[in-house]
Amino acid sequence: MPPQPPPSSFSLGDRAFAALGAGRPDTATLDLLHRAHLSRHLLLLRELRLSATVEPDWFTRLSTTDPDQTRQWIADPMTGLWAAHALRTGAAPDAAPAPRGGHRLTAHHRDLSLRVRVDDSDPLRRSLGLTPAPALTPVQAAHWSACLDEAWRLLVDRHRAAATTVAAVLRVIVPVLPDPVAEGISATSAEAFGAVAMSAPVDGRSLAAGLIHETQHSVLNTVQLLFPLVEPGGEREYSPWREDPRPASGVLHGAYAYLAVTRFWRDEWRAGGSPAGGFEFARWREAVLSAAGDLLDGGRLTPAGERFVTALRAQAAAWRDDPVAPETARLAALANADHRARWRLRNLAVTPGDTGRLADAWRAGQPPPAVTSRLSSAPGRALENSHRLRLAHARVKGDAADRTGDGDAGAGDAACVRGDHGTALRSYGEALVKNRDDDAAWSGLALVAPQQALRARPEVVRAAALALPGADIVTLADWLSG
């Protein structure tokens, strides 16, 4: 493991730590995070000097480079990535540091400026976790510049506190290839404080939301270097932001990033009354509260982690009384329930032994035995891909087009999003008659069925239905619901 800054060198008072947990770090706290990462970079360089793979004269060249250039190179986010990679691989640097390549952009609005380097050339940019885009064309570089200007005006005008944090933290943007499933993808690395990897934004508002999101990850990465928040080990759990199970540290990362996203959409909605903003605010507010509650109840947090997440949850809870339109609230709740149902069907399974016991009890006319759903080892990471979510977004925006998709499940999705549960039930049932293993229909059924077993544990009803191909699914669900 790369060396970490000595914890005794960095401290925060209770009030500053609570403000940090609530996503409102002050200037002194942000300065502390920068000093911590500079300290980490220096420790990494010291470890490199002590290693046998680095020639001593490399550090001689480093010390004779222009002092300002050397300081900038040491503090650069990609230096942390480079040094950690060199320690892991034993790859010796072959040249003294030089100014890094890329497109240097400055966005200025009112009295606040953001200066970033759009890095499309560093060989290590792949280490941020996503596939880097090729070198930008002049047209693509101009698009990034225009979106950054638009995003910065929006942040400074409507989200001043977030703009201050982004300006203090963000130093590098690495363009990456888009994913066909998602509108935009992004990532950060704990080894590159102040660097984010992002696909090209659609517009300034999407870039603003993405920068806020990823800046929060950068902040939390550094907080966890200084103050351990989560105990090691533990089972992977449900996360409202991922399709795969996540450790407690991953759930915390999601909750902290989406706390800032929730604040962004709350302010957008309050400023302009945008139904889309109200939908995003309502959806992520409840997701953050749910995840924070799970973390506090899960027993995996350190004492510092409990204080941090308590402040996080209190901030989200303070927004719970902010009213949104009833239809917007319904669609937001539907989106959250949809994600959880699809997650359970994707990641949880009933063992063959328990499935056999269910089938035996059904045939014998006995009550259903208790069974346990266990994490499946097969599914990996995937991006959210829900037809119902796309329909919900369209409905929130007032899109009159009713794109039902293919087959009975697609028709059920359209009815589900409209709130027509009767039609949705029939459509999903017809889809499952044709294909008893249709996960899109199972997850839709979990949203509109009256049976508790389908709503809470759709993977158990599916397992029983697959083991009993002649049984009626509704009757099975009634039996499993007790």
Image: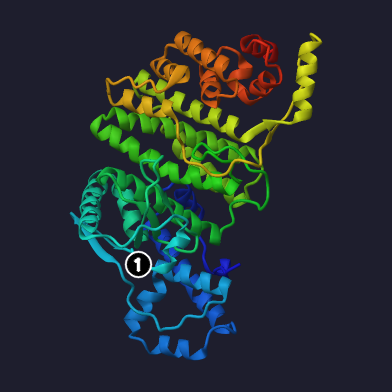
Left/right of residue 478 with respect to residue 421 in the rendered view: right
Q: In the rendered image, which quarter is residue 139 located in?
A: bottom left
Instruction: Check the picture and name the quadrant holding the C terminus.
Output: top right
Q: What's the residue type where badge 1 is placed? A: Ser
> Residue at the spot x=38%, y=16% of the render?
418
Residue 169 quadrant: bottom left
Residue at figure coordinates x 32%, y 49% from the top left: 161
Point out the image quarter for the N terminus: bottom right
- Residue bearing the label numbered 1: 121
From the top left corner, tell me how far across and down residue 466 is, in percent: 67, 21
Q: Position of residue 96 (x, y in %)?
A: 40, 84
Count of marks, rendered view: 1
Q: Is residue 5 above or below residue 248?
A: below
The answer to which of 211 and 470 lies nearer the viewer is 470
In this rendering, position of residue 77 left or right of residue 254: left
Using the image as rendered, state which of residue 378 and residue 84 is in the foreground.
378
Label 1: which secondary element: loop
Across and down, in percent, residue 384 comes to 46, 37
